[in-house]
């Protein structure tokens, strides 16, 4: 069905900035407080009050713009975007319209650790958030009413608008993932889509292959406020199929805003954009233009942390696979943990493997993160050292790790108390092997007549008798030696 169309996607992403106070007043931005307790005459839109720009928010926005490879303009200004909605007490939102903070950036789409494509960022501007409506019902349509919470009104946002450069739901997913990766290292936002501190509107259209006009003129659907990267992906997939089917029937696509229902995976019409929003933008008279000196911008550029691409490089050089690196890059806590653990334990592959399998399993089970892991990087390194020295097998180490996590104890102490240390004493293993060989003459015969599988059974018997504590590669070697002697006898 898609062969006669090309999928065109552009994303608008709103990111709440993690400042102490709001964009134009000193109210707290803290999430989850009692409704309407973080408000004042400024963010409630009382007459006669004046907004004052929060410098910390500007610093965050500039960092974001630079990390996304934008040109930051030394001069930008604020504008009033006017519309009526109960979550907007002033009936206008202070935003930036024709002279935004920054333009012409880019975000790489990364596949297998390499840049597969670059998506252009059209612009980044600052604006204030609106309040939040809590509908008394399952959804707006059947709500008995709505309650307004203005704690969020005036919280600083950046809006990051991409060019319509993405060609599939998967590219949109990868763009959002990398955008979040980049921003996560700047420490400027919680970036929690489920809490709304990062929100995405996805614009989707299908270009008939014989259409060569401006993409802006194609009728597009804007899927509003999707609350996870997965749902952005699902919503776009649904929209592609819906539009393709409509066009296949010869119907016209109407420009409209649609919502996404994550229960059934469908988008639904919210309002038609035929009548084109008229926001009657005009310059905000109560705020001076935002003027940034070249040295301010330069200093911000100098202070940027390494990019996710640079971190991927660091991980690749340490022998971490591209897949594992993606998991670590996407989780700053994991990266810090990885760096600390590899600083004290040389085998970086081993650290990575344990982090992403058994440590992650325990973090999930206990509801922890790599920041709050009860087995920290040094403790993990201590455990891995015991494997390296042959005191523990990998299997035993898993059990020891479980106990370490449970009790907070040190690896060596737990090994002592569990009495689980690995048997590496050759004579001790030989004694057990002799017994097993003597007790299973038929199996030994099978092995000697070429049935290699028989060896596995005998190894199993030795492990059983030693309660799994014999070092497996030694058991293997000693068994072979003993049976070779046996054959000669
Ligand atoms: P609006 O105010 O209508 O949301 P914006 O200028 O803020 O418009 O954003 C437009 C978004 O739509 C951009 O992300 C842009 O890349 C995207 N876009 C433009 N043309 C298309 C298209 N044909 N298909 C999909 N997205 C598009
Ligand atoms: Mg927009
Ligand atoms: Zn306020």
Image (tube, rainbow, N blue to C red):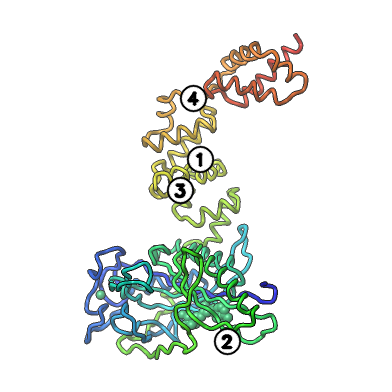
**Disc number placed over residue 337 in the picture, else none:** 3
- Give neighbour class at mark 2: few <14, some 14-19, many 20+ (Cα, 10 Å): few
For the point 34% across and 84% down, the residue is: 84
- Report crowding for label 3: few under 14, some 14 to 19, many 20 or more residues within 10 A (C-alpha): many
Determine whether the beta carbon of the residue marked 3 sits less than 8 angstroms from the nearest atom of ligand 1.
Answer: no
Cβ(mark 2) to ligand 1 < 8 Å? Answer: yes
Name the residue nearer the viewer: 34 or 122.
Answer: 34
Q: Which numbered disc, 2 or 1, marks the residue that appears first in the sequence?
A: 2
Give the mark, 4 or 1, whose residue is nearer the N terminus: 1
User: Residue 345: which numbered mark, if any?
Assistant: 1
Q: Mark number for residue 48?
A: none
Contact (Cβ within 8 Å) of mark 3 with mark 4: no
Residue corresponding to mark 2: 217
Left or right of 168 in this view: 355: left
SS at badge 4: loop
Which residue in the protein does label 4 denote? 421
Q: Is residue 133 left or right of residue 266?
A: left
Give the residue drawn at x 64%, y 20%.
458
Mark 4 Cβ inside 8 Å of ligand 1: no
Residue depth check, mark 3 versus mark 4: number of the one nearer the observer: 4
Check the picture and name the quadrant holding the N terminus: bottom right
Q: CA distance from mark 4 to mark 1?
A: 20 Å
């Amino acid at each position: 069905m898609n062969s006669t169309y090309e999928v065109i996607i552009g994303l608008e992403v709103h990111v709440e900035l993690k400042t102490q106070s709001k964009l134009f007043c000193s109210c707290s931005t803290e999430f989850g407080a009692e409704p309407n307790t973080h408000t004042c005459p400024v963010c409630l839109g009382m007459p006669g009050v004046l907004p004052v720009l929060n410098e910390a928010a500007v610093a965050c926005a500039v960092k974001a713009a630079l990390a996304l490879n934008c040109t930051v303009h030394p001069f930008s200004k604020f504008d009033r975007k006017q519309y009526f909605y109960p979550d907007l007490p002033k009936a206008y939102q202070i935003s930036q319209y024709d002279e935004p903070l920054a333009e012409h950036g880019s975000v790489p789409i990364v596949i297998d650790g390499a840049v597969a494509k670059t998506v252009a960022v059209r612009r980044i501007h600052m604006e204030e958030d609106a309040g939040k409506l809590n509908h008394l019902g399952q959804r707006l349509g059947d709500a008995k009413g709505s309650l307004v919470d203005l704690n969020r009104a005036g919280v600083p946002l950046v809006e990051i608008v991409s060019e319509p450069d993405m060609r599939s739901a998967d590219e949109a997913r990868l763009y959002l993932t990398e955008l979040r990766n980049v921003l996560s290292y700047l420490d400027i936002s919680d970036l929690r889509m489920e809490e709304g501190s990062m929100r995405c509107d996805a614009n989707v259209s299908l270009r008939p292959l014989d259409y060569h006009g401006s993409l802006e003129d194609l009728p597009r659907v804007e899927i509003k406020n999707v609350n996870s990267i997965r749902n952005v992906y699902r919503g776009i997939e649904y929209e592609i199929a819906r539009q393709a089917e409509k066009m296949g029937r010869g119907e016209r696509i109407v420009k409209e805003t649609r919502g996404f229902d994550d229960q059934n995976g469908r988008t639904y019409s919210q309002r038609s954009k035929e009548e084109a929003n008229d926001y009657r933008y005009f310059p905000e008279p109560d705020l001076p233009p935002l003027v940034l000196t070249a040295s301010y911008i330069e200093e911000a550029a100098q202070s940027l942390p390494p990019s996710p691409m640079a971190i991927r490089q660091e991980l690749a050089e340490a022998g971490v696979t591209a897949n594992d690196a993606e998991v670590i890059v996407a989780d700053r806590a994991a990266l810090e943990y990885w760096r600390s653990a590899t600083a004290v334990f040389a085998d970086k592959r081993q650290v990575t493997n344990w982090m992403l399998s058994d440590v992650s399993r325990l973090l999930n089970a206990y509801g922890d993160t790599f920041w709050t892991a009860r087995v920290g990087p040094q403790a993990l390194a201590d455990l891995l050292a015991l494997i390296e020295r042959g005191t523990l097998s990998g299997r035993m180490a898993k059990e020891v790790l479980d106990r370490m996590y449970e009790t907070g104890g040190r690896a060596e102490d737990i090994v002592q108390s569990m009495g689980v240390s690995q048997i590496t004493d050759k004579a001790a293993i030989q004694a057990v092997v002799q017994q097993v060989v003597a007790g299973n003459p038929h199996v030994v015969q099978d092995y000697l007549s070429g049935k290699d599988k028989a060896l596995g059974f005998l190894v199993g018997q030795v492990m059983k008798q030693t309660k799994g504590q014999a070092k497996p590669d030694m058991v293997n070697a000693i068994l072979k030696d003993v049976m070779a002697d046996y054959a000669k006898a």
